[in-house]
Amino acid sequence: MHTLRRTGPYFLLLFGMFLFSCQEKRDSSGQEPLLYVPDDLEATLWAESPMFYNPTNIDVDIRGRIWVTEAVNYRDFNNDTSEHLNHPEGDRVMILEDTDGDGKADSSKVFVQDKDLVSPLGIAVIGKKVIVSCSPSVIVYTDEDGDDHPDKKEVFLTGFGGKDHDHGLHSGIAGPDGRWYFSAGNAGPHIVTDKSGWTLRAGSVYAGGTPYNKENKPAMKSDDGRIWTGGVLFSVNPDGTGLKVIAHNFRNSYETAADSYGNFWQNDNDDEVESCRTSWVMEGGSAGYFSKTGIRTWRADRRPGQSIQTAHWHQEDPGVMPVGDVYGAGAPTGIVVNESDALGKTYRGLLLSADAGRNTIFGYRPRPSGAGYDLSDRTPFIASTDTDDVHYRWNAMDERKSKWFRPSDVAVGTDGAIYVADWYDPIVGGHQMVDKKGYGRIYRIVPKDGKLKSPVIDLGSIQGQIQALLSPAINVRNQGFVLLKAGGDKVLPDVKKILSSDNPYHRARAVWLLSQLGSAGIGETEKLLQDANADIRVTAFRALRQAQPAQLLRYAKQLSGDKSPAVRREVAIALRDVPLDQCQDILLSLADGFDGKDPAYLNALGIALQGKEAAFYPLLLSHLHAGAPESWSPRLSGLVWELHPDAAAQALQSRATDKQLPEKDRKRALTALAFIPDREAADDMRTIAGDKDGRIAGLAQWWLKFRKTNDWQAYLKDWKSPPGDLPEAHPEMLKLRRQVADTALPMKVRMAVANQLALSPDGRLHLVALMDGKQLPDAVIEQIGPKMLKADDRNIHALMDRYFNTSDTASYTVEAIDKLSADAGKGKLLFMSNCLVCHKIGTTGNEIGPDLTTIQTRYDKSGILESIVHPDAAVAFGSEPYIITLKNGAALYGLLLSDGPVVTAMDTYGKQYIMESAQIESKRRLNTTIMPSPRHMSLSQNDVANIAAFLLQNNKDVTVNK
């Protein structure tokens, strides 16, 4: 853990003596403060249960009231409703209010309770409409008469995956352009048709996590002809038309923040491999979680030598947006940009990103970096502890109540205060909860020396409408925007006055509005293309692009040579769907602006040239006066890597085999070659693989083996990959399996055949697959049970035990083990013989399960014991085991890494197998875990105590003592 630094010259130098100091001191008794916040701010408890329960998301209305979506009925399939608070009539939306202005809520009312609300994950209050995100639908409740009860319910959009799932549909916001923006996690498929008939289709290989998320589908095309993968950020008009994907290939972006310039910011969680991130979102970009079409996981795509964090977000692949700040373990949730000066100008522009796992709201100061943003300036802005648990695991329990602070959302009120919703639980996510009362809290963060008050806004006047437009609360702004837009020319003078504000976010809101106020407003917006502030130029271009699409090329030409890489980035993105013959000169000018290094700018050019790569390549070579490939400039080599057109294959081979080039440049050329899906590229890779240069040739061999299973499958049929890609064949097994499942055969025959299958490891897996599919009659199960439990392999034995041993009398209790004396030395030996097959300590072991080198920093003793004793209490998303049976009779038990025409799986010892889908007989996801329990490993309670003692050591190693 890292102790939060109370002061530091670095922060003093950059942001003044207040920012991020988190200097709330313990009182004289040594008691921790309510929350740790900067010195000039204070945190107060604004509301708590029973005014509401289990808050998942909050929003603020024009009266300053806080609206809350509850998830009391959270994952009832996994949590016993008799043991925790339950709402049989459905989850609720609550309205909380501070009626007397004393800084604490004193009123709570139910807006709606609906059986269609099953753990909703998002809410947006936009005028009379209350928009609730709850997979499979966006539901709009309309309160026409203002009595705080809905008069109308409308299923606005439907077809989202992730019902009752943490990775489903998330909250919406009103963007500065008046459109609505939503995010959805990777628990697809998402097949959603807007009100004009346009259909989004997004999916991936990921399935599981809930009983409802049984199937997903990658590589689907939407009505725009594009493949959108995994989690998506999308927008739609308020009337339900015009659905458009902004970005895709997220894992589970819990919420997206929009600033007034039209930038989007998101945080995304990971596969329990310490790779959570916060990032700026590139329009049209891929966030890089899955392979391009969602057919493969990052584990299947991980290349030799790649770090987990690099592979997890595909950061060495072309066509992927920059990753942003990868900050390690966590459970990211709500996110918002503070554009208000109410806390002081010091905090204007602060990006607030909640992480429930880390008990904190991170504060970021995004700094422009080329065409993107540098997010390295991150500190715990609000936290419940004075230490940051950098190795958090979602199911790690801690008895300290300060660690139960689980911020699920963060919002800015109409008063400018920061409001934080606290789910409050010893763990977070994973479809589990331990707190049985549904307790929740909302905190309010305000200046110490000033009293903030929510204003009374009169929407009947132009000044009131402008006051709403300039509100600190994002969805309140939309009410002012809509009414001012309807005012047309008469509001133009008042809107223009905002352009003189010293708050650039206010200026940006005026830009968006001016672009929608007729020809005069357009004229004013066009002037701002020359503004001294690059953010305003970006905003003006974005606004004009929407308001005047017929003039796009004129604006693009005007700004293609802008001195700001961010402005040129926006020009590039806007040209994605423009035919090359209409924009080639602009694109060449934009290519001139690439410095050979800026990843965001390069990604934007790649987006601009989607579908135009082949035709643009010769133009690019001529324009940049390309010589021999070995002498290409960083600008040209970077562009060819990003575009990887078919015609570049020979040139890339030349660069990859040129021993005079730095190895990193050669590897990059090899990667670009591997992303060209044609025969020539495959043949060139073969040539490189035959070279005597060991490192590059070895990597080329890996690419051939890998691409034989996907893009180059048709071109490498005669290339013999190294042996071992398929499990050992047992053709007789398939015949026996079919006989056992054949209900037309006599029971005596079926039982005899089942007994025969139960004698071999593969046969046992076939029987488990049949049992899981309810194809084994009780008589057969009873007959074969003893034989199934004789499996020698301890991992397979654990699987058999979970299915066939109904008389488990072994008793392991955390409480009893916790009281035993323990020997860490003995625990080390037990760990080495039982646990290294799946886990790593330092550089020793495997990566099937989490790295346990620093487990002592994220789990206490009881948490470690709980994980060992009850490994299947909850299974991490993406870690659900499968049984795959092949048509050659082989059977495989392990993790599914990719699906589709080619399937990649990893067995319980870390060996990967790659097979064509046509070779597969069946594929079943099991509702269990791969990790054996102590009993399955023949470990006593003392053994468990010893292993825990070893894992709690700070400097543990797994070297053999001599």
Image (cartoon, rainbow, N blue to C red):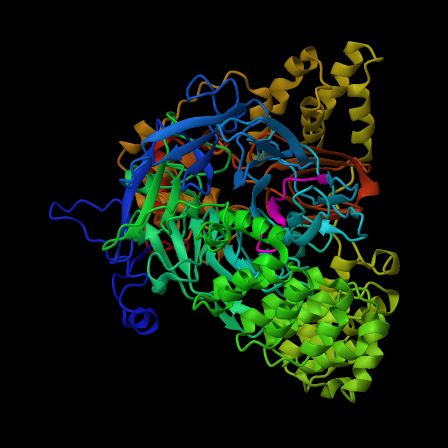
Is there any visible trace of residue 66 in the rendered image?
yes
Q: Nearer the viewer, residue 936 or 561?
A: 561
Q: Nearer the viewer, residue 347 or 461?
A: 461
Residue 570 placed where, x, y %? 65, 68
Is there any visible trace of residue 672 in the rendered image?
no
Instruction: Residue at 87%, 69% (x, y): give it.
Output: 680
Quick one: which residue is furthest to the left in this view?
28
Residue 603 sits in quarter: bottom right
| Magenta-drawn stretch contains 178 | yes
Q: Is 686 displayed left or right of 785 in the figure?
A: right
Instruction: Residue at 30%, 69% (x, y): give it.
Output: 16
Residue 896 placed where, x, y %? 67, 43
Residue 563 placed where, x, y %? 60, 81
Say above or below: 639 vs 300. Answer: below
Residue 31 sits in quarter: top left
Residue 350 placed where, x, y %? 42, 60
Q: Is 491 displayed left or right of 56 in the figure?
A: right
Q: Nearer the viewer, residue 770 or 46?
A: 46
The boundaries of the magenta stretch are 175-191
Q: Nearer the viewer, residue 657 or 335?
A: 335
Say above or below: 571 vs 770. Answer: below
Picture quarter with the C terminus: bottom left
| Magenta-drawn stretch contains 487 | no
Picture quarter with the N terminus: bottom left
Say above or below: 663 vs 889. Answer: below
Say above or below: 699 vs 130. Answer: below
Q: Is 272 displayed left or right of 618 in the figure?
A: left
Number of numbered callouts drawn: 0
